[in-house]
Image (cartoon, rainbow, N blue to C red):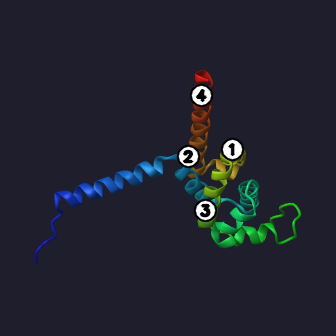
Amino acid sequence: MSTPTLKPEAAADKLKTSSSAARRFNRTDVAVPVLLAQVYDIAPPSERRRLLTQLMQPLGVLSLVAVAGGVFARLRFRDAPGPLNLRMEDTLLIGAEEVRALAEHAQQVSVETVDALRLWLTQGPVLAGSAAALLLVQLLKRRVANRRGASSTRSEHD
């Protein structure tokens, strides 16, 4: 029985792919939705409702229809075109994967909305002990600082 050998070219391709995936995850626009989904997964229903409300707020009808098979649009427009009124039981219908997709869309529309979740994460005692929440807070702080730095650099050049 022969053991398969890895050719140098194949090893190099595999290394490129894995380092590319690692760089991609280190980008905050990719990591934040993943961590938000993990935080959502451990959060109690009341906190889940707050998170969903915050993430859904900046999204229009087309975005809500496009995300997660339209589940968020059904929740948003269930009670006619009035204010967003999520129920505790709604959080049982939404899983972490749907929250990740929602967070990706929300930060494309309004990165500030997602960054504002830092305050929510630090105020809740249940979430404050979560490793995912702590990492998420750090990423959000860094992202805000980077944007401020980029903004001040642009102002100096103008």
Identify the disc placed on residue 112: 1
Residue position marked by numbered label 4 in the rendering: 154
Residue position marked by numbered label 2 in the rendering: 135
Q: Secondary structure beneath disc 1?
A: helix
Q: Residues within 10 Å of mark 1 (few under 14, many from 20)?
A: some
Residue type at the position of mark 1: Glu
Tell me where residue 96 appears, x and y as whole percent.
Answer: 61, 65
Residue position marked by numbered label 3 in the rendering: 101
Q: Is residue 27 left or right of residue 148?
A: left
Compute the Cα span from label 2 to label 1: 18 Å
Residue type at the position of mark 3: Ala
Lower position in the chain sequence, tag 2 or tag 3:
3
Compute the Cα span from label 1 to label 3: 17 Å
Residue type at the position of mark 4: Arg
In depth, the one of 155 and 48 nearer the eye is 155
Q: Is residue 67 left or right of residue 131?
A: right
